[in-house]
Image: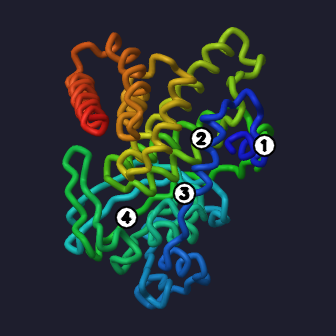
Amino acid sequence: SSSSVLHVIGCPPRFGEALCLAMVAVEEVKEEKGEEQEEAEDAEVPQKNEDGWQEMMEGKIKKRTAKEGTGEPPEVDRDVVCSFEVRTQDSQVLQSRSRFRYRIGESEAVPALELSLRHMREGEEAEVSALSRFLWGPDGCPGVGPGEKDIPPDADVLLYVTLHEILPRQPADRHRQQWTDRVQELEWRKTNGNDHFRRKKLAAAARCYEKGMEIFPEVPIIAPQTLGRSADYAAAAATKMVADIASNLSAVYLEQEKTRDALDHAKIAVDLCPKHDKALYRAAKAAMQLGDFQECEDYLAKLQPLQPEDLGVKRLAAELEKAKAKHAAKAKKLGA
């Protein structure tokens, strides 16, 4: 039963059943690392050849320093801030990311970037060359920003990487982390997840949002009193960001046809922010897909005053009426 599940995972009663069951769902959807990522993680410290390239993975990934950095390379579980450009073999820039934050060892970055970062120093700039399967592989990567172009499937593109900063290691216990560190992590998990989602990298987006959901496990979120008069505002802002992440994770699950998980996370967002229009819409959509017309109608009743002219909301309301009519006709036929 749901109550026994909540007891097993140790959810506090104040979490609410939807949040706790969603936490179980998050654990169930974690994916195995790909073969390429496992290979990259096992690579030894590379040696430079006569052209200055450090060959990793028997030459499948190569890195050449363009500007030296300082200090030691990042260890596993350290957060890094980096920028990179994706270039064709003739140096045409296809895409770029500016000051993105990754946690080394989480395999969020493509394997060639992850491994290169593990062998870079703060302030270093480097060229990276790799086989396509250690980059974006057969799926490629759509361009979404201004002036960006698609990375074609199976393209052996080049990266130009800058490692700006290696951040201090964070305590494993969330309650021992500083408030500002937790909020900053919340922000970058959301930012990275949004970028993956826009590029149709649903598994990567889900992992980012799932990590974001772990940052503030306590509900309600209470900011430290050391913030003084700003404490209530800080707590409200963090709560809104968690609600955004839950709503965005619901959107990912809808795309992945994990409808029950989508509904659970939309409910979390609505519980945190009752007027969260995107969460209300996703909850209504998921409920209709699950055949719960009354729940769908309830969410639409809350949503329509917030978005009276939204075409998507009107379309969903029309779909609901059509589905209800079809269901009623089927029931009448069976009862005849």
Q: Horizontally, is 210 left or right of 229 in the view?
A: left
Q: In the image, which disc is placed on residue 213?
A: 2
Residue shown at 26% from the left, 24% from the top: 317
Front residue of this view, candidates 29 and 181: 29
Residue 217 is drawn in which quadrant?
A: top right
| Side of 150 relative to 294 (left or right) | left
Question: Marks 1 and 3: CB-CB under 8 Å?
Answer: no
Mark on residue 7? 1
Amino acid tagged 2 = Met
Q: Earlier in the sequence, mark 4 or mark 3?
A: 3
Which callout, 2 or 1, points to the residue nearer the camera? 1
Percent position of residue 97, x then y: 37, 51
State which tag comes first along the sequence, 2 or 1: 1
Kindly tell me whether residue 245 is visible in this rendering: no
For label 3, the SS is loop
Which quarter of the figure has residue 293? Answer: top left
Which residue is painted at 59% across and 25% down in the image?
239
The residue under the point 45% across, 46% down is 193
Q: Label 4, label 2: how many angstroms apart (C-alpha)? A: 32 Å
The residue beneath circle 4 is 160
Q: Which residue is mark 3?
A: 29
Mark 4 residue element: strand
Distance from label 3 to label 2 (Cα)?
A: 14 Å
The amino acid sitting under disc 4 is: Tyr
Quadrant showing the N terminus = top right
Q: Earlier in the sequence, mark 4 or mark 2?
A: 4
Percent x, y of residue 298: 42, 20
The front one of 246 and 119 is: 246
Q: Is residue 257 above or below residue 18?
A: below
- In space, the residues marked 2 and 1 are separated at their CA atoms by 20 Å
Q: Amino acid at mark 3?
A: Val
Judged from the image, the secondary structure of the residue bearing numbered disc 2 is helix
